[in-house]
Amino acid sequence: MTCRAVSSDGRQAELRREDDCLLVAPLSQCLTTPHLTIQLSLLESVVETTNPLVYLELSASHQYLGRLTVRLWGHLRRAQHFRALCLGTFGPSFVGSKFEYVGNRGRPGEYIVGGSYLTATTSDGGVRGPWLGTRTTRGLMEGLEWGGNFVGEDREGVLQGAGGGHPEYDSLFCVCSRSDPTGKSQCPFGEVVSGMGVVRTAILHDPVSDLTITGCGLLVPNV
């Protein structure tokens, strides 16, 4: 049985249940009719908004590595932007996204950077599939936090902005895999609550450019 959530613009998000959790995949144009549908707005009304959970599924060279579950700090626009790219709210999503590089490898403050995404339209406005657009790192929202009062700890598991505060790189993020007591993050906006083993496996993979986000979305627990 196929179940999907339907947005106000008619796009649909696949729903699947695993381990007492509901996984909500990114919105897309669907050509088939599901057995069961629910309005996305209704589903979102029961989702935790202060600290929503999202997930990323990682693969390397077509081998599935596993899933990260991330708790976002929902009061931050940067967290809202990340959630939008997990769900495909503005069209593009992280599906098909490649990782860029590993910083401070083997040292305190080690981190892995990803977050480029594929645009959903061609230059003439035609819609492409999620794997066929142009790769970009430009932010989809304005006014994302960086530095100043938003600086935080460089702690294992923390999700951070990685674009230097520049709008053209605002989709980039990094996950810290080794705490650095003397380090600082310019804008932490969430934390990994499960799947750090997947992060460490990804960091060891060579080349890093083989690493791909093959699934992402919202995670609704206890359903």
Image (tube, rainbow, N blue to C red):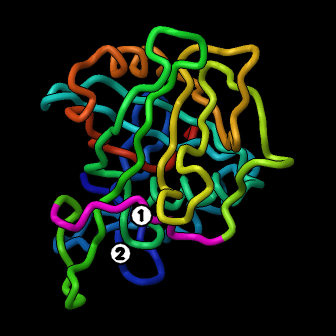
Return the residue nearer the eye: 180 or 126: 180
For mark 2, does the 10 Å Cα neighbourhood hold few (<14), some (14 to 19), or many (20 or more) residues? some
The tag earlier along the polypeptide, 2 or 1, is 2
**Is 134 within the magenta?**
yes
| Pointer 1 residue | 88
| Placement of 178 over or under 208, stated as above or below | above
Q: Quadrant of residue 78?
A: bottom right
Query: Magenta region: which residues?
Result: 132-142
Q: Quadrant of residue 124?
A: bottom left
**Is 116 within the magenta?**
no
Marker disc for residue 112: none
| Placement of 174 over or under 25, stated as above or below | above
Q: Which residue is drawn at 26% across and 39% down?
A: 212
Q: Does dot 1 land on a helix, a strand or a loop?
A: loop
What amino acid type is highlighted by mark number 1? Gly
What amino acid type is highlighted by mark number 2? Arg
Of circles 2 and 1, the one toward us is 1
Q: Is the magenta stretch mostly helix, strand or loop?
A: loop
70 displayed left or right of 189 = left
Q: Do the residues labelled 2 and 1 touch (CB within 8 Å)?
A: yes
Coordinates of residue 9 in the picture (x, y in percent): 42, 83
Query: In whole angstroms, how far apart are the C-alphas of marks 2 and 1?
Result: 10 Å
Give the number of marks: 2
Q: Does dot 2 land on a helix, a strand or a loop?
A: loop
For mark 1, does the 10 Å Cα neighbourhood hold few (<14), some (14 to 19), or many (20 or more) residues? many
Q: Which residue is drawn at 44% across and 29% down?
A: 112
Q: Which residue is drawn at 46% across and 39% down?
A: 55
| Placement of 4 over or under 172, stated as above or below | below
Coordinates of residue 94 in the picture (x, y in percent): 37, 52
Q: In which quarter of the image is residue 71?
A: top right
| Pointer 2 residue | 11
Coordinates of residue 12 in the picture (x, y in percent): 35, 69
